[in-house]
Structure formats: structure tokens, C-alpha cells
């Protein structure tokens, strides 16, 4: 499945380089790789169930195309990334000039 997704992304990158565009799979929120993964997953599933490879390949292409077209048509996206800021280990939390009651240094 990983090979299918990497192949799809590589082909898209080659297309974008030849057309002088920015890489489409890097656009925030796009389901480019998800569509490739869905198609590849269907191919692996059908091949595992004994479906002839040419038939499974055609179904794979159809599923990938439909997922990508549906994502574009219905504006399906992933949420934008955000930074998760956590508390560093070993440093007490200070609120309003006082140490956090749960820290060892704040008692």
C-alpha cells in the first residue's frame, strides 16, 4: 500500500515539475494522498480476495478517481495544522507569578 501511495505522489510531483507548479500534495488540507491510499487499499483487498489483477486495477483507478473528485467537488479537506505546546519536563508552571500547586518547587 505504501508503494502505491508513494508512486501516486511521485507521479504527481513529476507532473507538477513539468508544468512548473507547486507540488499539489503539499497543499494544506488536500486529500491527494488519501485518495491514492484508498485506491491502493482496494487493489490490495481485491487481489487478496482472488479478483483478477486487471479487474482489481480498473476498480482501483475508479475508486481513486472518485475519492479525489468527491474531495474536490464537496471541498473535503483535512483540518489545518497547529502547534501543540506542552509543558517541558522539569520546569514548574508559573501562573500569575506563583508556582503551580502541583509542582515540587511550588510548595
Image: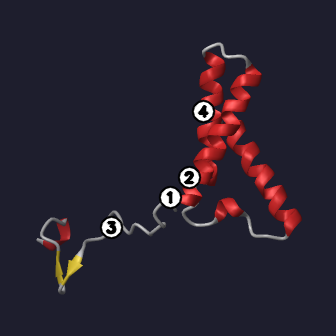
Mark 4 or mark 2: whose residue is earlier in sequence: 4
Q: CA distance from mark 1 to mark 2?
A: 8 Å
State the SS at label 2.
Answer: helix
Q: Is mark 3 in CB contact (under 8 Å) with mark 1?
A: no
Q: Which residue is mark 4?
A: 41
Q: Indicate how the structure is coloured in the image.
A: secondary structure
| Image depth: mark 2 or mark 3 in front | 2
Considering only vertical position in the picture, is 6 above or below 12? above
Spot occupied by residue 105 in the image (x, y as percentages of width and height): 19, 70
Quarter of the figure with the C terminus: bottom left
Which residue extends farthest top?
50
Q: Which residue is mark 2?
A: 70
In which quadrant of the rendered view does residue 55 lie? top right
Q: Which residue is mark 3?
A: 87
Mark 2 or mark 3: whose residue is earlier in sequence: 2
Mark 3 or mark 4: whose residue is earlier in sequence: 4
| Image depth: mark 1 or mark 2 in front | 2
Q: CA distance from mark 4 to mark 2?
A: 18 Å
Q: Which residue is mark 1?
A: 76
**Residue at left 77%, top 54%?**
12
Along the line of sight, the residue nearer the viewer: 12 or 52: 52
Q: CA distance from mark 2 to mark 3?
A: 40 Å
Quarter of the figure with the N terminus: top right
State the SS at label 4.
Answer: helix
| Count of residue discs | 4
Which residue extends farthest right?
18
**Residue at left 72%, top 44%?**
6
The crowding category of the residue bearing disc 1, from other C-alpha atoms within 10 Å (few below 14, some 14 to 19, many at least 20), is some
State the SS at label 1.
Answer: loop
State the SS at label 3.
Answer: loop
The crowding category of the residue bearing disc 4, from other C-alpha atoms within 10 Å (few below 14, some 14 to 19, many at least 20), is some
Amino acid at each position: 500500500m505504501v508503494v502505491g501511495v508513494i508512486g501516486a505522489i511521485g507521479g504527481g510531483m513529476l507532473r507538477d515539475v513539468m508544468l512548473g507548479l507547486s507540488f499539489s500534495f503539499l497543499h494544506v488540507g488536500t486529500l491527494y494522498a488519501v485518495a491514492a491510499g484508498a485506491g491502493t487499499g482496494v487493489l490490495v483487498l481485491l487481489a487478496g480476495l482472488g479478483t483478477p489483477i486487471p479487474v482489481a486495477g480498473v476498480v482501483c483507478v475508479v475508486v481513486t478517481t472518485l475519492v479525489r473528485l468527491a474531495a474536490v467537488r464537496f471541498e473535503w479537506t483535512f483540518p489545518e495544522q497547529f502547534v501543540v505546546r506542552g509543558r517541558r519536563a522539569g520546569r514548574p508552571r508559573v501562573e500569575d507569578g506563583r508556582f503551580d500547586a502541583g509542582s515540587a518547587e511550588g510548595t
